[in-house]
Amino acid sequence: MAKNIRRIIGGILALVLVAGACFVLSVQISFRRRYEVSVCNQYSMVPNINLSLYLNEYVYQTGDDANGISQPGDYVLLDKKSTNFKVGDIVSAHVTWPETSKNEAVVKRLVGLPNDKIRIDREVLNAGEINYHLYVNNKLLYTKPQIEVLGVSTVNGAELVLDNSSTYNSYLYYLTHCPEQVGIDESGKPCIVLGEDEYFLLGDNWAASYDCMDKDCGPISSANLGHIVVAIINYDASYRMEMFRYSFKLLFKRK
């Protein structure tokens, strides 16, 4: 009798283990069908993605370094099936930089969809401080101060202060040197006007960013637009545990 009970219990435990393994495997398969994992390179955004690496003066490598050690950046999870792009989304894209003639995979913020009008206003406050306001179709998307403290460097203990006027200066250059891309928005002010199949990407680091505001880049087409970023995993996190956690979160809690 006792022997039969042990056999029954052992059989139940075996079934539970097999069922659990099948469940985990099915989650991973479903996850990989919908999502793609990508490592960010030096062109990816500060501060929203690569701030920790940037503050630690982390050196990016496309291959192995002199010591034979590959140094990756942070990871992003990309939704391969979602095509509902919205202004403000962080997305992946492929851009060819004229100075290098290389096609690079980048992660940037989507600030303009086809036929949108993009404008940046410079506001000088009473205290002499300067704010930059980014408008899309005459609606404020976000505001950037000229001086923005992104964090505290662990290398030298000093605050990392960035002057955000670079993107604004590029915007003024764009208006002057690309008249075919310039129009007037609802406010009556000059703006960048996108075409029928044009998307505009900006980095969050306005002090130094490779993005569509670069005079040699400009808007990208839908063919070069990639996927929406749905999660970010820091490089020093436990990669496998974070991936497993996001597998459940994204598959079972998404709307």
Image (cartoon, rainbow, N blue to C red):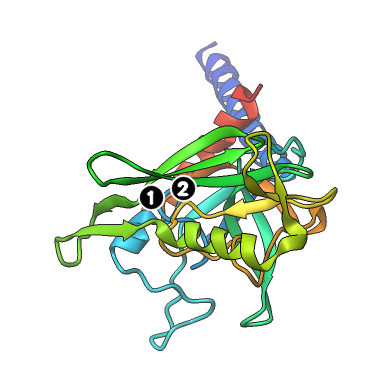
- Residue visible at 38% across and 50% down? 237
Picture layout, residue 29 above or below residue 165:
above
User: Residue 207, how many percent across, how many down?
Assistant: 41, 61
Nearest the viewer among 143 and 119 is: 119
Query: Pointer 1 and pointer 2: residues touching (CB < 8 Å)?
Result: yes
Q: Please, what is the three-letter code of the amino acid marked with disc 2?
A: Ile
Residue with the mark numbered 1: 237
Residue at the farthest left position: 157
Image quadrant holding the C terminus, namely top right
Residue with the mark numbered 2: 233
User: Residue 10, how many percent across, how many down?
Assistant: 56, 24
Question: Is disc 1 placed on a helix, strand or loop?
Answer: loop
| Residue 201 located left or right of residue 59 | right
Image quadrant holding the N terminus, namely top right
Picture layout, residue 195 above or below residue 20:
below
- Residue visible at 56% across and 58% down? 171
| Residues packed near mark 2 inside 10 Å, few (<14), some (14 to 19) or many (20 plus) | some
Residue at the farthest bottom position: 66
Whether residue 190 is visible: yes
Q: Please, what is the three-letter code of the amino acid marked with disc 1?
A: Ala
Q: How many marks?
A: 2
Residue 153, quarter of the rendered image: bottom left
User: Residue 36, how many percent across, how many down?
Assistant: 66, 50
Whether residue 15 is visible: no
User: Residue 74, how many percent across, how many down?
Assistant: 46, 56
Residue at the farthest front position: 188
Question: Is disc 2 placed on a helix, strand or loop?
Answer: strand
Picture layout, residue 106 above or below residue 196:
below
